[in-house]
Image (spheres, rainbow, N blue to C red):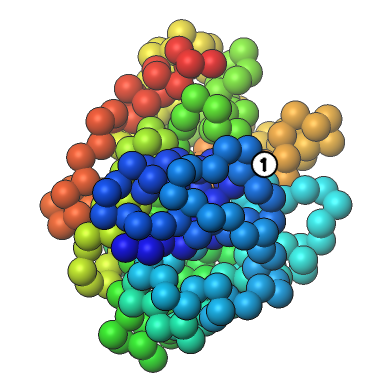
């Protein structure tokens, strides 16, 4: 089996490539990214690639599965929103259209729970058939929702192509740098609503699910999250940190001030505002039953493991 991975130098891309490299069923890995990984797995051939102008139809010729992970998660200050959209949304479109043109039989996409949108009336938990209501003022949510909308159209036009979408929650790992890491690295944990819960998972568990897509035969969508979502109070008790309960109207100015000081990025600010304010809890039961996913760590164990490794 020949596999291609876009965004292979990113955190999740490296984990998935390493997992594929150890799989005897995987013959070769085509790693695509704008920056070369520091170390290349034995089976990987790397190609420097920009999603805005690459010939994906040519690159994907003869590939059995395309994993699309390339995405700007934390937007640098010097990049405009239009340029970010060109990479995240139009770049994703070009990857998928190239895969279809090359006759790739299976596409695996890394979406996010953010595609559901953070809303006060979200059901708890969100299921895979819950409507996507991405937030227009949360760029990550908006972009993931836009890409999924394109995939809906693509699937309708190409029913024979297997398209698998994963919607992982925020996950933790030994060296990950994301909004959760920022939120957990301070002396106190911030909280808006004491009863609002947060999903967490461990990085290798998430990578395992993506690897399992190799053997899955039909188009599908899977939420990914560790069991037992936690309130901020429960998180504080687990890792011995004090919890600071903010008034709701403090949240936005506090986050903006943190961005100005360089304590958090714009993307991290939006993640924090969404996760602290509204429920964004998913059920991963479908992945467990249909995919056979067996995460090793629940939310609390992932949190404790992360703190011990940092």
Circle 1 crowding by C-alpha within 10 Å: few under 14, some 14–19, many from 20? many
Judge from the rendering whether residue 83 lies leftward or rightward of residue 43; answer left or right: right
Residue situated furthest left in the rendering? 289
Q: Which residue, as the protein is rendered here, is positioned at the far bottom?
A: 157
The residue lying at 40 percent from left, 13 percent from top is: 237
Q: Residue at x 46, y 82 (%)?
A: 102
- Please tell me how many numbered marks the rendered image carries: 1
* Percent of width and height locating residue 16: 42, 46
Position in image of residue 243 (x %, y %): 52, 17
Q: Position of residue 156 (x, y in %)?
A: 36, 88
Please state if 40 lies on the left or on the right of 130 as rendered.
right
Q: In the image, is residue 250 above or below residue 306?
A: below
* Quadrant hosting residue 50: bottom right
Which image quarter holds the N terminus?
bottom left
Residue 98, image x, y percentages: 53, 80
Q: Is residue 12 visible?
A: no
Left or right: residue 218 compared with residue 1: left
Element at badge 1? Answer: helix
Front-lying residue, 209 or 194: 209
The front one of 258 and 166 is: 166
Residue 204 shows up from this direction = yes
Circle 1 sits on which residue? Answer: 269
The quarter in which the C terminus is drawn is top right
Note whether 112 is above or below 55 in the view shown. Answer: above
Question: Which residue is painted at 21% across and 46% down in the image?
Answer: 293
Q: Residue furthest top?
A: 240
Whether residue 246 sits left or right of residue 285 in the image: it is right
Residue at 36%, 88% (x, y): give it: 158
């Amino acid at each position: 089996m020949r596999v291609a991975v876009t965004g292979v130098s990113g955190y999740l891309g490296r984990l998935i490539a390493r997992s594929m490299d150890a799989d005897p069923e995987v013959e070769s890995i085509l790693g695509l990214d704008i920056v070369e990984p520091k170390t290349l797995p034995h089976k990987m051939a790397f190609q420097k690639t920009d999603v805005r102008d690459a010939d994906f139809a040519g690159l994907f010729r003869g590939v059995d599965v395309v994993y699309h992970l390339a995405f700007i998660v934390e937007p640098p200050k010097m990049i405009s929103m239009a340029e970010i959209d060109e990479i995240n949304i139009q770049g994703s479109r070009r990857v998928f259209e190239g895969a279809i043109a090359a006759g790739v039989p299976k596409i695996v996409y890394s979406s996010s729970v953010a595609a559901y949108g953070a809303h006060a009336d979200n059901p708890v938990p969100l299921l895979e058939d819950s409507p996507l209501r991405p937030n227009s003022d949360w760029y990550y949510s908006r972009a993931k929702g836009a890409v999924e909308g394109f995939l809906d159209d693509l699937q309708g036009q190409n029913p024979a192509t297997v398209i698998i979408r994963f919607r992982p929650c925020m996950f933790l790992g030994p060296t990950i740098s994301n909004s959760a890491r920022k939120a957990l690295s301070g002396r106190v944990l911030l909280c808006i609503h004491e009863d609002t819960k947060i999903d967490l998972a461990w990085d290798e568990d998430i990578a395992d699910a993506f690897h399992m897509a190799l053997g899955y035969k039909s188009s599908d969508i899977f939420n990914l999250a560790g069991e037992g979502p936690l309130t901020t109070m429960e998180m504080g008790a687990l890792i011995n940190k004090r919890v600071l309960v903010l008034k709701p109207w403090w949240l936005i100015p506090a986050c903006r001030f943190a961005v100005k000081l360089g304590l958090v990025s714009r993307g991290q600010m939006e993640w924090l505002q969404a996760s602290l304010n509204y429920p964004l809890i998913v059920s991963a039961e479908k992945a467990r039953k249909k995919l056979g996913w067996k995460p090793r760590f629940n939310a609390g164990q992932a949190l404790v493991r992360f703190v011990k490794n940092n």
